[in-house]
Image (spheres, rainbow, N blue to C red):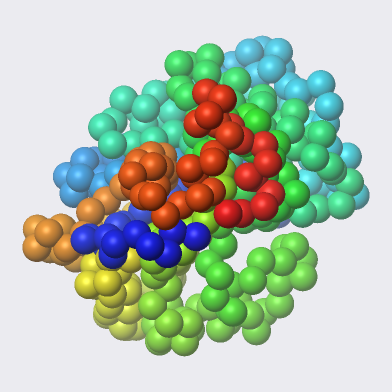
Amino acid sequence: MLSAMSTPEKGILIVSLDLELYWGVRDIARLDESRDKLLAARAAVPRLLDLFTRHEIHATWATVGMLFFHSKEDLLRCVPRTLPRYARRKLSPYEDLETLGANETQDPFHFAYSLVQAIASTPRQEIGTHTFSHYYCLEDGQDVDTFRADLNAGVSAASRLGIGIESLVFPRNQVNEGYLQACAEAGIRVYRGNNAGWMHARRQRRKESQPWRGLRLLDCYLNLSGHNTYDPREITGRVPMELPSSRYLRMNPRWLGPLEPLRMRRLRYEMQHAARHGRVYHLWFHPEDIGADADRNYSFLEKVFEGFADLREEGAMESLNMQEFFHRFEKVKSRSPFCPALKSHPSRQLGQNYPRIALISPG
Ligand SMILES: [Zn+2]
């Protein structure tokens, strides 16, 4: 722990998005019912890039590796040799591969080469991984070896486009602590963790009950779970670094419209709390969330980022993507004489990139 660091001067806004298209929902929704939503998600990407550019938002786009390809032929060549054998067979995408269209034009639901290029060429945007196949790390029937093969395939899919991957978002936020060493070996330096609050403990999807979901919905409007910000000094020195989320920026249906001012107030209050106390506020969402009812959702997001821009102009807050946060944080640690975990960091002494021992025993 970095308990002796001085209080950071500014709050930090982190924004991360999960870009997955049909790979992220194929087990729970039929393609013919999802087409409009997925097309709207695609259309949301350039609009989000424009919004981020105008408000100078630095964001991490955790992207499913299969989306990096522009053709089926290309994708099939890069499938990992070892595949998960989920107890719930529906979770595995590999049996559907033959049904894919030939390329992104014919099958915009499974390929997103052009979107990846657009994100990569927009300033301040980072491309991270959401694993190769939208891999479920807490499900039965898979293990660390199949995870490792999947993650490496995701990193390779990006590197073929000249994109280096350092950030990971676990699909369905199924963080598996036992897999962190494999992550480090694949070059992952930071991952999005779950909100540590009592209300947000992550379970396998089928174990999530309605009352918990209802409480989380209520917490979007009323302060049930606190400010959802955290002190960067609480983050341990291990690699990959865990960067917990603060809030899933859910976009609500129109019938909840009258409550939107309450929700905006709650978000702004949390952001102000981060700004006043030098804390981190980490928002995440999917382009799919924005695409449906796009104009209304954009204007909501615009207001969130205007609130951030006011704090930035006051000098109270800044925006960093996950990768930037990691490198900033490392720099702070390396200046600190009070961080024995880092001073004796094996990677520094030996010039290796990823420590093996520090991974599973946080300093
Ligand atoms: Zn996902």
Nearer to me, 317 or 66 = 317
Q: Residue sitting at 47 percent across and 24 percent down?
A: 164
Nearer to me, 71 or 52 = 52
Q: Residue sitting at 75 percent across and 37 percent down?
A: 147
Residue 83, image quadrant: top right
Task: Decide if residue 292 is on the left or right side of residue 156.
Answer: left
Task: Find the residue positioned furthest to the left.
Answer: 314
Task: Decide if residue 73 is on the left or right side of residue 230.
Answer: right
Q: Residue sitting at 67 percent across and 79 percent down?
A: 210
Task: Decide if residue 195 is on the left or right side of residue 45.
Answer: right
Query: Residue 345: image x %, image y %?
Result: 54, 39
User: Can residue 122 be seen?
Assistant: yes
Split into 4 quadrants, where in the image is the C terminus? bottom right
Query: Residue 340: image x %, image y %?
Result: 50, 50
Residue 199 against residue 233 in the figure, above or below: below
User: Can residue 19 be seen?
Assistant: no
Nearer to me, 357 or 209 = 357
Query: Residue 94: image x %, image y %?
Result: 78, 31
Query: Residue 197: image x %, image y %?
Result: 54, 75
Residue 69 against residue 134 in the figure, above or below: above
